Image (tube, helix red, strand yellow):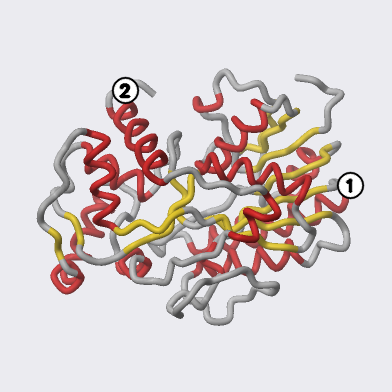
Amino acid sequence: MNNEKPVSVITGGTGYVGLALVKHLVSQGENIRLFLLEDHPCLDGIECEKIFGNICNAEDVDKCFKGAETVYHIAGVVDISGKKEQLMWNVNVGGTKNVVESCKRQGVKNLIYVSSIDTYPDKFCEGQISERSVYSEVGLESPYAITKAIATQIVLDAKDDLKVCCVQPTGVIGPDDYMGSSVGAMVDLFIKGLFPVSMNFGEYNFVDARDMAVAMRNAVDTGRSGECYILGGHRVTVDELMGFMANTLGKKKPKVKISKALLKPFVPLVSKAMDIAHLPPMLNAFSLSKLEENCNFSNEKAKRELGFSPRPVEETIRDTVLWHRKKLEGAV
């Protein structure tokens, strides 16, 4: 590691976005320090400094941020099961407060925070959704959305003390899903032949974690302090997603497409089965509602100011499926 280069700290470096950013920054020859709760094999072979601690402990955060020029704050708790509400408040809000205050104390110049498009309460409106300048819990229902909105505003309020930018990804996918996402669980089931039907409703906006990583690094140089940037990729219907996955595996897309009316009565049963199988909550009332929200997010600001360039969604889904197949074969 070149100790003469500025230090960039990454919190949450083993998750989808974090690992993609780690790999991107290392490929650019940057000096990386990771703030981790615990080590993970996905970091094997990656040249970086590791400091272990808890983001909810201000002293741990100070220790990690000392001497850093840039902090990428990615660590957070995502939960749609309703079982981790207090943890989300502790980490998403309390942890972010610690990050911001530590950045001030340690003289950090740049803070790039991964917010969420779930901070937008108007997703059942028509038309395109663009960035806001103020974020609050007003109009939000899920604890995750509320905690991320509050945390986003905490970061934006620090714009006079250091450069702060918030990126707001849509549904993140791509390879290297070591932590196990809800979408990843669905991909695994599809590969195993346990997802034999499609749906005649629903769509979502997906972004590749690798494209996010490039935009986040660019935010340090070209992002404007106190601004949010939506990192939205491509809108894909559930049926299109099934088709892309089938093509990658050389299979036929499921012919049967079920309706929401037919699926809805079985959602509690499916959700319970996922819980028993210790799988991410792939299908429950919350995720079902997400499929009907307006996912027409504008990424023009991020393209213009961060050089954000989402790759073709077919490429992302192909790489995602092939990585999961390798994982199931024990090759990763």
37, above or below 297, in the image: above
At 75% from the left and 19% from the top, the residue drawn is 1
Image quadrant containing the C terminus: top left
User: What number is the disc on residue 107?
Assistant: 1
Residue in the picture at 69% in, 57% down = 96
Left or right relative to 281: residue 141: right
Quarter of image, res 330 = top left
Residue at image x 65%, y 72%? Answer: 132
Asked if residue 160 lies left or right of residue 179, the reply is right
In this view, 44 is above or below 286: above
Calculate the distance from the C-alpha at mark 2 to the C-alpha at mark 1: 44 Å
As shown in the figure, which amino acid type bears the numbered disc 1? Gly
Q: Position of residue 122 (x, y in %)?
A: 50, 78
Q: Nearer the viewer, residue 50 or 168?
A: 168
- Tell me the element at label 2: loop
Cβ–Cβ below 8 Å for labels 2 and 1? no
Q: Secondary structure at mark 1?
A: loop
Name the residue tied to disc 2: 330
Residue 8: give its label. none
